[in-house]
Image (cartoon, rainbow, N blue to C red):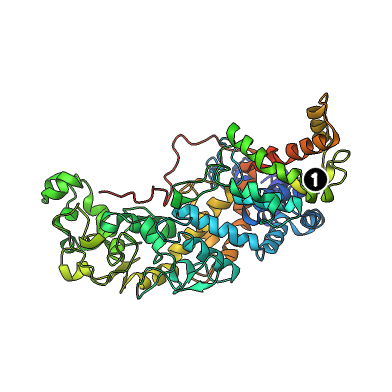
Amino acid sequence: MRPLALSACAALLAACVGDKPPPDPAARSEEVRTYLSALAPILVSRTLSADEIALIEQKVADEGQIAVARQVLSGWLGEPALADAARELIQTRLSVSGSGIDGVNYELPGNLAAWTVVNGAPWSTLVTADFCVGDDLSMIECDSGAPYTAGLLTTRAYLKARASRFNLTRASTLLNVFACQRYPVPQEVEPSIAKERLRAMFQANTPEEQEDPAAADAFGNGFGCYNCHSQFAWHAQLFVQFDQDGLFRPDATGLQDPEGELGRSVGGLFASHLADPAEAASPASQMLGVPVADLGEAGRVLGESQVMTECMARNILEYGAGLEPGAKIAAELISEIAAELSPGQATFADLVLAVFGNQRVYQTLVEGIRHPAPPADEAAPAPGDGEQGSEEQS
Amino acid sequence: MRTCLLLLAAALAAPGCEAEVASPDEETPDFEVARTQVELLPYRVRLARVAQVAGVAQDDPILTVLRESRLELGDHDYASGVRPDLRWSASRMGAWVKAILPVCDSEAMQARYPDLIDDPGALIAAAYGRDATEEDLTAIDQALEGASLDDAERRRAICLAILSSAEFVVR
């Protein structure tokens, strides 16, 4: 190796090991200001303060850009406006908000999100809380009447807004928003249910296999039914005891109404995917490969999972950085962020710091602000972005 | 750091370094910030920022029109079938100006920015989170040049210009 080349390599290596930033302190400070100025309105509803700008200018040269960015971010985590951001994130991801004329308070999911931030509770509380939160952010009893609770998943707001035949929209929204997955889900995430446990229409994977004329005429064409519904079945079953108004109904059978539309059970309930009547009536199912007794247990499994932790990191990155829901994000980046977080324990504040205090997020966002990419030809489908009451089909 | 490591890898692969390292692929960003049409900040953020600039609470009467126009200004209410709409359209600009007019005319703003006509710098700093530049001040002067306005009208025009500017309302 020639000495000159060696010195060049050494210089580069030193720069890499030390993560040497650009040499001009003013430019480095400006970069941090650009980054944080893009985030502050969304996360804390304001511009950078004079104190924050001074801190950036004073400390970046000595402590480095990401360290100073993290200091400023840390200062935001106790601000009341952060709860407003959390509320908005959940409302827009679920497409649920407002006060309906039907007597349902559609603010309950957003209230729980805000409460969780204000009280420093784990963000997984969204799907594990055994209480609901009123508009004044006080704890209240939930409104569905169910003997089990799963945070916002057992609010009438969620249940009614996402009601649909076979409970498909409730299931898919749950999976999209809290697991960042779409059907079919990788088997390692959610193993499929055995074919023979499903109603005949969901066992087909080709038109030739479709033996249920009702399905062939009105519902599925037979292509890939089993692929998706073998997993839909688990998550839809969790909602079998909730009627179309979001009310708990212990008398639910999960059986198809012989006089009704396909996928509907009697009395405003929805039909189960399962063939056995006893199984069809039961809320027992599976979440992420774990057997659960009901939606309450499913929420706890989900809340403790790495899948949800990574999904929440993704949601917060998308929301804060202004990315489309479902945008293409490097999986390694999400894993790197999630490695900093404790599944089930991470708060919204922890997530914000882990996401926006991440070096790669910093670099990519700064670069994106300076040189934005042209719009994608096709926008990625948005998790939970369907119209209220829309239905998934095979 | 990642970029840096790629540079290092490239350097090591170049003639002169002994290690044989494959040339790195063109770097793919971890995510892309798309260049789309101008997008407003969420309504809740705009409301909060106007309240901060005026130094009032968000339920202050000077913000009544702003609050009452929230859906017209792009806020969401899914129960009523209204999704967020963050387009900065001509009609929304008109609604926004109408909504912040009572703010600009308020005593709170007069008290907070008494020298607005001669020195808009304080309002610019509060609104933008940075010091006013020559460019900012020139733009205001040029916009008002030739206009026959009394002090109250001039004050209102400056306030509306700043609180309706892209830097204040756009993401």
Q: Quadrant of residue A347?
A: bottom right
- What residue sits 34% from the left and 51% below the top? A389
Q: Can residue A314 be seen in this view?
A: no
Q: How crowded is mark 1: few (under 14 residues within 10 Å), some or many (20 or more)?
A: many
Q: In which quarter of the image is residue A51?
A: bottom right
- What residue sits 83% from the left and 41% below the top? B120
Return the residue nearer the eye: A214 or A347.
A214
Q: Name the residue under label 1.
A: B123
| Horizontal and vertical percent position of residue A104 | 42, 61
Chain under numbered label 1: B
- What residue sits 73% from the left and 49% below the top? A33
| Horizontal and vertical percent position of residue A76 | 68, 61
Residue A286 appears left or right of A338:
left
Return the residue nearer the eye: A237 or A21.
A237
| Horizontal and vertical percent position of residue A317 | 55, 53
Q: Is residue B130 above or below residue B59?
A: above
